[in-house]
Amino acid sequence: MVDYLIRLRNAPPFGGRSELVIDGTSIGRVVSDMMHEQSVDHTAITMTGGQEWRRAGRYCNASKTLMIENLAVLFASGDLKFAHDLPLRSEIEEDLASFTTQTTAAGNQIITQSRNASGHGDTGIALIVAAFASQYLAPQNIRVSTLKGWF
């Protein structure tokens, strides 16, 4: 798995010009540790309860609720759309449709994911992680200045 991620990270067209973000939940933590041992720069996002997120080095803990709400906003605003001929589109949509929410008597929201026909929800989770990283982990302060009078 680690070798595959290294090849993928270095492959064209984004090789060397992209950030690698992985699901650091469960077995992802082990993958992150193995990648760190091989000096592969990356961020591992661990899905947690609650509504908060925090980053500490290569690790980021983020609420599953926050991450899913972020994805919903990106779709609703039109900032994220599926291409009509996107490979795996139906699998991703099936994964995303497998999420359900419940509210406890105490008012806490619980999000669960059922298994889809292929037995996992990896493509949906990958999209949720990528969407979160694009909005919360990307550089937020981009300053553009011009040098007036310089030719």
Image: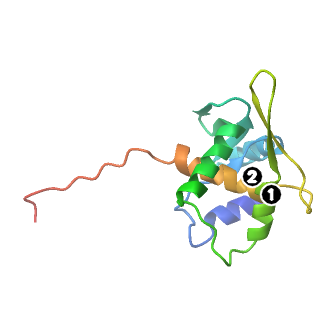
- Disc 1 vs disc 2: Cβ atoms closer than 8 Å? yes
Residue located 66% across and 36% down the image: 62
Which of the pair 115/59 is nearer the observer?
115
Position in image of residue 52 (x %, y %) = 62, 30
What amino acid does circle 2 point to?
Ile
Position in image of residue 113 (x %, y %) = 84, 47
- Compared to residue 16, the image places residue 12 above or below, namely below
Q: Earlier in the sequence, mark 1 or mark 2?
A: 1
Q: Quadrant of residue 32?
A: top right
Answer yes or no: is residue 112 visible: yes
Residue located 68% across and 51% down the image: 128
Which of the pair 50/3 is nearer the observer?
50
11 with respect to 126 (left or right): left
Which of the pair 27/112 is nearer the observer?
112
Distance Cα–Cα, label 1 vs label 2: 8 Å
34 with respect to 18 (left or right): right
Provide the residue designation for mark 2.
125
Q: Residue furthest front?
A: 105
Residue located 65% across and 31% down the image: 51
111 with respect to 116 (left or right): left
SS class, disc 2 = helix
Position in image of residue 149 (x %, y %) = 7, 59
- Compared to residue 56, the image places residue 141 above or below, namely below
Provide the residue designation for mark 1.
95
Quadrant assignment for the C terminus:
bottom left
